[in-house]
Image: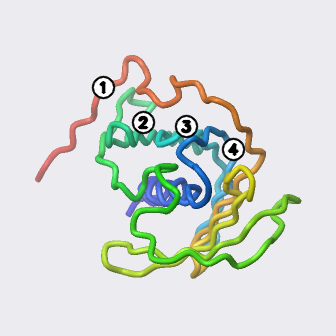
Amino acid sequence: MGLQLKRYRLFLWVVLFHSGAGDASALEFSSETVTSSRGVSFDGKVYVSGNKVRMESGADVNIVRGDKGVTWALMPGRRMYLERPVDARMIAGTSETMPGEIEREFLGNDTVNGRKVARYRVVYDDNGMSRALELWLDPVSSLPFRVRAEDGGWTVEYRNAVTWPEDTALFELPQGYSRYKEKSY
């Protein structure tokens, strides 16, 4: 699996897990992100507006449109995009609990980057396999501050989050882009 595809899949899992408490469907925020996986870290930016998400990391840009059931991976150098269906579990902010969630355990209060947060352990079904992660949320706003796979395989920290209505153009295909057609062999 290529690095971009790994980042894409990790990104989709990460943005999903912010929806764990309160009425997350109304969340609108942007945040810097630092993602670490197997000793490699990369910086990014995430924009969230309900079930619409945009993630930027270097030249990689992915837009998740939960309302349309699609994900667009932009290829700026070619002015093209790859369109894929969205797995319902990967739509950020759609409900109080994530689809496939089996259990949620409050682990206590903690501090992340100087902010008091609530820490949870979430067990979920991933295509018939039980998986777990840890989630640190702001107890008032429900904004994520950290998400980590329980096995330590990846971690995402959200920094400098700002809540306000995001520009709707962030969640649209850029003008002049054409759809990339995958060849079947």
Residue matched to label 2: 74
Residue matched to label 3: 49
* Residue under the point 70% across and 53% down: 158
- Disc 1 vs disc 2: Cβ atoms closer than 8 Å? no
Q: Which of 155 and 161 is in front in this view?
A: 161
Amino acid residing under circle 3:
Ser
User: Which image quadrant for residue 114?
Assistant: bottom right
Amino acid residing under circle 2:
Leu
User: Which image quadrant for residue 14?
Assistant: bottom right
**In the image, which is nearer the foreground, mark 1 or mark 4?**
4
Sequence-first tag of 1 and 3: 3
Instruction: Farthest residue to the left: give it.
Output: 185
CA–CA distance between discs 2 and 4?
20 Å
Sequence-first tag of 1 and 2: 2
Mark seen at residue 178: 1
Secondary structure beneath label 4: strand
